[in-house]
Amino acid sequence: MQLLLISDTHGLHHKLQLSPTDMLIHAGDISSRGSKAEILDFLDWFEKQDAQHKIFIAGNHDYFFDNASTEEINSIIPKNITYLCDSGTTIEGINIWGSPVQPWFHDWAFNRKRGVEINQHWQLIPNNTDILITHGPAYGILDRTIHNELVGCEDLLERVKIIQPKLFVFGHIHEGYGMQQNHGVDFVNASVLDVQYRQVNDPVVYSF
């Protein structure tokens, strides 16, 4: 199965020219300020992409998903799109889990304090997860900022080491874009924008 991986489009999704794929995954920050209008615009675009399966999670900019009720969220998600929020799905035998949570960052959406609070979310990830999608990175892998700081989550890294999914997709740290294999896992930071919010990075093509 061919996967196309993107993240951190921040409302600039219309500038992307995506090739047809079997599964399209977006790892959060689909909007700039998280308004419902922005979300609806993204969903309209995402629904039209040439992919058999379309999956996304929210990110720290996507306030709508942090504030709206489950009923309201479900009412706007098109039928051919899967939205994951500390939840999972199975597609053609592949177990996929997604979470928007990241360590506390400038009082944005889906922030959790490091340690016990955030680790409660990571403990929800099933041991049989094949593809893990979170907005923020694990500690020390594609999480280095322009200030040379490693800002990923330590507890998430420990959980990933235990689960060992085949693929772990994330974004959040734009300057961490790339792919790296560690602990038997393919880590992909799929941020398509750079730190100045310019679209400079290509979607990542991955064969599962």
Image: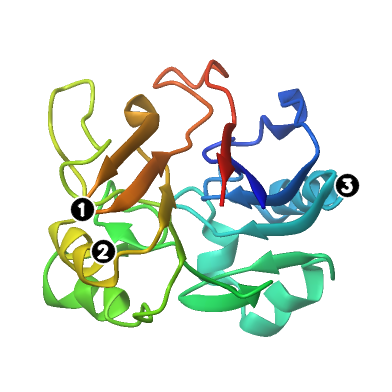
Q: Quote the CA–CA distance across marks 1 and 3.
A: 36 Å
Classify 10 Å Cα crowding around label 2: few (below 14), some (14-19), many (20 and above).
many
Give whichever of discs 2 and 3 has the lower sequence position: 3
Compared with 148, 139 (above or below) is below
The location of residue 158, given as percent across then percent down, is 15, 65
Q: Amino acid at mark 2?
A: Val
Q: Amino acid at mark 1?
A: His
Give whichever of discs 1 and 2 has the lower sequence position: 2
The location of residue 13, given as percent across then percent down, is 70, 33
The residue wearing badge 2 is 160
The residue wearing badge 3 is 48
Q: Secondary structure at mark 1?
A: loop
Q: CB under 8 Å between callouts 1 and 2?
A: yes
Front in this rendered view, residue 167 or 46: 167
Position of 42 with respect to 207 (left or right) is: right
The residue wearing badge 1 is 183
